[in-house]
Image (cartoon, rainbow, N blue to C red):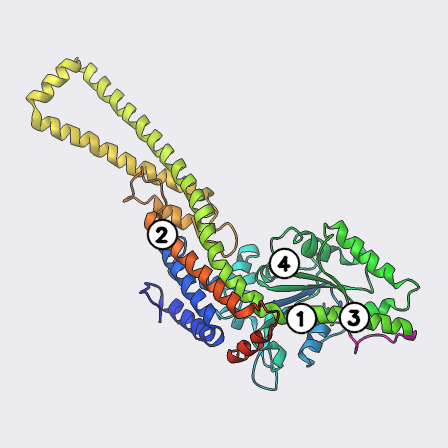
C-alpha cells in the first residue's frame, strides 16, 4: 500500500503494484527505494515533469542485469550456455543471433520463449516501453519489436534473481538504428557489461564497429568500471609462435580507442576449444583462463549487490538532477519568456499611448483638456479606461501564449531517454493563471525543496541499510549468503 494518495491512471497503478509485489518479496531495502521513487513521482507530477501515466520507478531496471555484447561469433552465446549449464542459445560460426535475448529464471525445465512485445509491456523488465524509444529513432520500427527482442526462460540456479542478455554480433553497418538504440539502452541499464572480442580476429579492422560504438563511445562514462573487456577463444592462439602477440594486438586496438586502463581478460571455452598439444603451454593457458574466469564469475555474482546500490543511489542522483539541472534550465526558459512578454507589453503600451495621443490631437485636445474631460465625465472615463485595459489584457494573454509556444518549440521534450519532460513542465509553468513575475517552474518552491531533501535523506538511510547488509568489516562476507538465502524472491515468468 502506498503511504499517500496518488491521482494516477489505473494502468499505472496496476503495473506499479505488480512491481511492488516482486520487489517486496526480493529485497526489503529496495521496496523502500520504490517508495522514494514514488515520492519523487509526486513532486514531478506537480511540476509537470512527468505525466500521470508515467513513473520514475518504471524507468529503471530493478533486476540485476548483465549484458553480453561484442563482435559476432566471439562466443557470447557459448559463454552464456556454459554459465547456465544448459544449451539455451544456438551457437555457430555464422552470425547466429539476430536479436537480443533476455534470459531470466523460469521454474519449468523446458525453456519458454516469449516475443519482444512481452518485454515491452511488462514493467518488471528493463525493456518496458522500449518500442517508444525505438520509434523515436527509427519510425515504424517500434511496432516490429518482436524482430529485435525475445525472452527466454531458464531454470538454471545461476540465473535466479538476475537477467542476462545475449546480443547479436556487433556490426554497425548492418545494424539498423533500432539495434544500436537497444544496445545503448542495454548498456545504460546494465550493472555489468561483458564485451567480447574474438581472438581469431584481433586486428582492429575486424572489430572496428565494436571498437567505435562499444569502446570509444563508452570509455569516458562515469560507470566505466562496469565494463569487462574479454578476449575470448584465446585457445586458438596457442598454436601461434607468439600467442602474446594476439593479446598485444588486441590491447593496442583498445588503447587506440582511448582504453588504457580497465579490466582485460583472456579466456576460452573448454568445450569449444581447439586441442592444445603442447602440455606446458596448455597448462599455462588453462591457469590464466581459470584465474580470469574466476574474476568474471565473481563479478557476475556481485551484480545483485551493485544493482541495489545503483537503484538506491539513483534516487539522490535523480533528485539532484532535477534540482541542479532541470530546474535551472526551466528557470532559464521562463526568464527568457518573461523578458520577451514584458518587452512586448511595453511596446504595445507605447503603441496604445501613441494612438490615443494621435486621436486626441486630431480632435485638438491636449493633456490639460484630457484631464478636464476625465474629471467631468467620470463614467465615460471609467468605460474608456476599462476598454483600453481590456484591449491591453487581450494583447497580453495572446502575446504570452505566442512567446511561450515559440520557446516551447525549441525545448527538447527530454534531454535524454527516461529524462523528465521539460516541455510539459515549461508549458504548465507559463499557463495563463501563472504570474509573469513568478521565476520558478510550477510546483517548485521551498516546500518542494524540503520534500526533496527528505527523500534524499531517506535514500541515504537506505544506503546505510545496504552497507549493514552487504559489508562486513571483520572481513567475512558470509552474511551476504545467509541474507540472500532469506530473500527467496526471484523473477519468475
Ligand atoms: N576455439 C574456440 N571456439 C569457440 C569458443 N567459444 C565459442 N567458440 C565457437 O565459436 C563459434 C561462435 O560461437 P557463438 O557462441 O555462437 O558466438 P556468438 O558471439 O554468440 O555469435 P553471434 O550470435 O553470431 O554473434 C561457435 O562455433 C563456437 O563453438 C572458444 O573459446 N574457443
Ligand atoms: Mg550468439
Disc 4 element: helix
- Residue 210 at what x, y percent from top left? 72, 58
User: Mark 4 = which residue?
Assistant: 180
Q: Which mark is residue 277?
A: none
Q: Is residue 140 above or below residue 28?
A: above
> What's the CA distance linking mark 3 and mark 2?
53 Å
User: Mark 2 = which residue?
Assistant: 450
- Whether residue 236 sits left or right of residue 144 in the image: it is right
Q: Which mark is residue 289?
A: 3
N-terminal-most mark, 4 or 3: 4
Start and end of the magenta stretch? 268-279
Task: Spot the residue most to the bottom.
Answer: 109
N-terminal-most mark, 3 or 2: 3
N-terminal-most mark, 1 or 3: 3
- The answer to whether any part of residue 17 appears in the image is yes
For residue 172, what is the image quadrant? bottom right
Disc 1 element: helix
Q: Nearer the viewer, mark 4 or mark 3?
A: 3
Local crowd size for mark 3, using a 10 Å CA cut-off: few (<14), some (14–19), many (≥20): many
Q: Is residue 76 above or below residue 390?
A: below
- Residue 104 at what x, y percent from top left? 58, 75
Residue displayed at 71% across by 53% down: 212
Q: Nearer the viewer, mark 4 or mark 1?
A: 1
N-terminal-most mark, 4 or 2: 4
User: Mark 1 = which residue?
Assistant: 298
Amino acid at each position: 500500500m502506498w503511504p499517500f494518495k496518488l491521482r494516477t491512471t489505473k494502468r499505472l497503478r496496476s503495473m506499479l503494484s505488480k512491481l511492488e509485489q516482486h520487489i517486496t518479496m526480493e529485497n526489503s531495502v529496495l521496496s523502500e527505494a520504490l517508495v522514494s521513487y514514488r515520492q519523487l513521482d509526486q513532486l514531478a507530477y506537480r511540476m509537470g515533469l512527468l505525466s500521470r501515466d508515467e513513473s520514475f520507478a518504471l524507468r529503471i531496471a530493478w533486476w540485476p542485469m548483465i549484458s553480453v555484447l561484442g563482435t559476432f561469433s566471439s562466443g557470447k552465446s557459448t559463454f552464456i550456455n556454459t554459465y547456465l549449464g544448459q544449451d539455451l542459445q544456438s551457437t555457430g560460426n555464422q552470425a547466429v543471433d539476430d536479436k537480443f535475448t533476455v534470459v531470466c529464471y523460469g521454474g519449468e525445465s523446458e525453456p519458454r520463449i516469449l516475443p519482444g512485445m512481452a518485454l515491452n509491456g511488462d514493467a518488471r523488465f528493463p525493456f518496458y516501453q522500449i518500442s517508444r524509444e525505438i520509434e523515436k529513432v527509427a519510425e515504424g520500427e517500434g511496432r516490429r519489436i518482436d524482430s529485435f527482442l525475445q525472452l527466454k526462460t531458464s531454470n538454471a540456479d545461476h540465473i535466479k534473481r538476475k537477467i542476462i542478455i545475449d546480443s547479436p554480433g556487433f556490426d554497425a553497418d548492418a545494424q539498423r538504428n533500432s539495434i544500436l538504440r537497444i544496445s545503448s539502452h542495454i548498456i545504460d541499464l546494465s550493472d555489468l557489461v561483458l564485451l567480447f572480442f574474438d581472438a581469431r580476429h584481433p586486428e582492429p579492422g575486424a572489430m572496428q564497429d565494436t571498437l567505435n560504438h562499444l569502446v570509444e563511445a563508452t570509455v569516458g562514462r562515469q560507470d566505466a568500471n562496469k565494463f569487462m573487456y574479454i578476449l575470448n577463444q584465446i585457445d586458438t592462439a596457442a598454436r601461434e609462435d607468439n600467442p602474446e602477440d594476439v593479446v598485444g594486438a588486441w590491447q593496442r586496438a583498445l588503447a587506440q580507442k582511448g582504453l588504457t586502463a580497465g579490466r582485460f581478460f583472456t579466456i576460452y571455452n573448454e568445450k569449444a576449444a581447439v586441442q592444445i598439444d603442447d602440455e606446458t603451454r596448455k597448462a599455462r593457458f588453462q591457469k590464466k583462463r581459470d584465474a580470469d574466469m574466476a574474476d568474471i564469475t565473481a563479478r557476475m555474482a556481485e551484480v545483485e549487490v551493485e544493482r541495489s546500490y545503483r537503484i538506491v543511489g539513483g534516487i539522490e542522483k535523480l533528485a539532484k538532477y532535477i534540482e541542479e539541472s532541470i530546474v535551472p534550465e526551466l528557470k532559464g526558459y521562463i526568464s527568457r519568456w518573461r523578458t520577451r512578454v514584458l518587452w512586448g507589453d511595453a511596446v504595445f503600451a507605447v503603441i496604445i499611448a501613441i494612438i490615443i495621443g494621435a486621436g486626441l490631437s486630431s480632435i485638438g485636445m491636449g493633456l490639460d483638456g484630457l484631464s478636464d474631460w476625465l474629471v467631468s465625465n467620470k463614467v465615460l472615463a471609467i468605460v474608456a479606461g476599462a476598454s483600453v485595459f481590456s484591449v491591453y489584457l487581450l494583447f497580453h494573454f495572446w502575446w504570452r501564449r505566442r512567446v511561450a509556444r515559440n520557446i516551447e518549440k525549441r525545448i527538447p521534450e527530454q534531454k535524454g531517454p527516461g529524462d523528465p519532460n521539460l516541455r510539459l513542465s515549461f508549458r504548465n509553468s507559463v499557463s495563463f493563471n501563472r504570474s509573469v513575475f513568478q521565476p520558478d517552474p510550477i510546483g517548485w518552491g521551498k516546500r518542494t525543496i524540503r520534500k526533496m531533501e527528505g527523500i534524499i535523506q531517506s535514500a541515504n538511510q537506505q544506503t546505510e541499510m545496504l552497507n549493514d547488509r552487504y559489508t562486513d568489516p571483520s572481513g567475512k562476507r558470509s552474511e551476504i549468503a545467509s541474507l540472500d538465502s532469506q530473500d527467496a524472491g526471484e523473477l519468475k515468468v
